[in-house]
Image: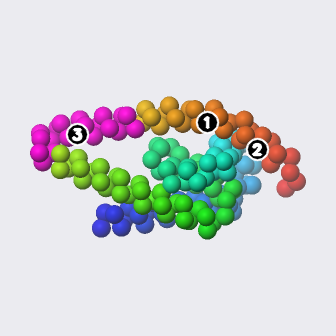
């Protein structure tokens, strides 16, 4: 049940973001000028690294909305669904597997040690996300700003 609920929720959420990006991207750029560079960054990231980014973006905290909106701008829905479904299966299996593993670890040792291990695992994941995210943003930002500038010069 947990696997099914997580799968349905994550796939539904990513498809909603995709459709918002594809249907409202021009309005999003105008309504929220502060968010426009971030949305363009997501679109350029999907454009350049979609094959790797879409299956893995759920693992990086804070990128779910950005990449979902960007995918709606820069790729067709059929390809998005395939890559996103692969990513959803990987993410659900990893999260449920880690949760079950921590639960089993808590049965074998003192429960607080399993909690400490889980917190340290989460901390390492957040640190890796910050370090890799900054490097990726630094690499993609010039492309995103150029794409945003091109978009702003197009007639409405």
Q: Which mark is residue 114?
A: none
Provide the residue span drawn in magenta: 106-125
The residue that disc 1 covers is 137
Q: CA distance from mark 3 to mark 1?
A: 32 Å
* In this rendering, position of residue 58 left or right of residue 53: left
- x, y percentage for residue 107? 12, 48
Q: CA distance from mark 3 to mark 2?
A: 44 Å
Give whichever of 82, 15 is nearer the camera: 82
The quarter of the picture where the C terminus appears is bottom right
Query: What is the secondary structure assignment of the residue under circle 2?
Result: helix
Q: Main secondary structure of the magenta part?
A: helix
Give yes or no for residue 119 being in the magenta stretch.
yes
Give yes or no for residue 13 being in the magenta stretch.
no
Q: CA distance from mark 1 to mark 2?
A: 15 Å
Q: Dot 2: few (<14), some (14–19), or many (≥20) neighbours within 10 Å?
A: many
Q: Dot 3: few (<14), some (14–19), or many (≥20) neighbours within 10 Å?
A: some
- x, y percentage for residue 111? 15, 42
Instruction: Identify the image quadrant of residue 135.
Output: top right
Q: Residue at x 54, y 36 (%)?
A: 133
Q: Quick one: label 3 or label 1, which is nearer the N terminus?
A: 3
Query: What is the secondary structure assignment of the residue under circle 1?
Result: helix
Q: Residue at x 17, y 38 (%)?
A: 112
Give whichever of 116, 29 is nearer the camera: 116
The quarter of the picture where the N terminus appears is bottom left
Query: What is the secondary structure assignment of the residue under circle 3?
Result: helix
The residue that disc 2 covers is 148
Q: Residue at x 29, y 54 (%)?
A: 97
Q: Which mark is residue 115?
A: 3
Instruction: Identify the image quadrant of residue 77.
Output: bottom right
- Residue 32 visible in image: no
């Amino acid at each position: 049940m947990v696997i099914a609920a997580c799968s349905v929720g994550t796939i539904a959420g990513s498809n909603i973001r995709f459709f918002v990006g594809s249907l409202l991207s021009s309005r999003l750029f105008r309504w929220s000028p502060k968010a426009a560079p971030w949305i363009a960054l997501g679109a350029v990231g999907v454009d350049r690294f979609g094959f790797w980014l879409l299956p893995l973006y759920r693992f990086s905290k804070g990128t779910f909305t950005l990449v979902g909106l960007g995918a709606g701008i820069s790729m067709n829905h059929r390809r998005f669904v395939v890559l996103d479904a692969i990513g959803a299966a990987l993410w659900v299996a990893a999260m449920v597997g880690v949760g079950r593993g921590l639960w089993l670890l808590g049965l074998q040792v003192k429960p607080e040690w399993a909690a400490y291990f889980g917190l340290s695992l989460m901390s390492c994941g957040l640190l890796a996300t910050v370090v890799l995210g900054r490097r990726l943003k630094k690499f993609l930002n010039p492309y995103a700003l150029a794409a945003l500038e091109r978009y702003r010069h197009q007639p409405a």
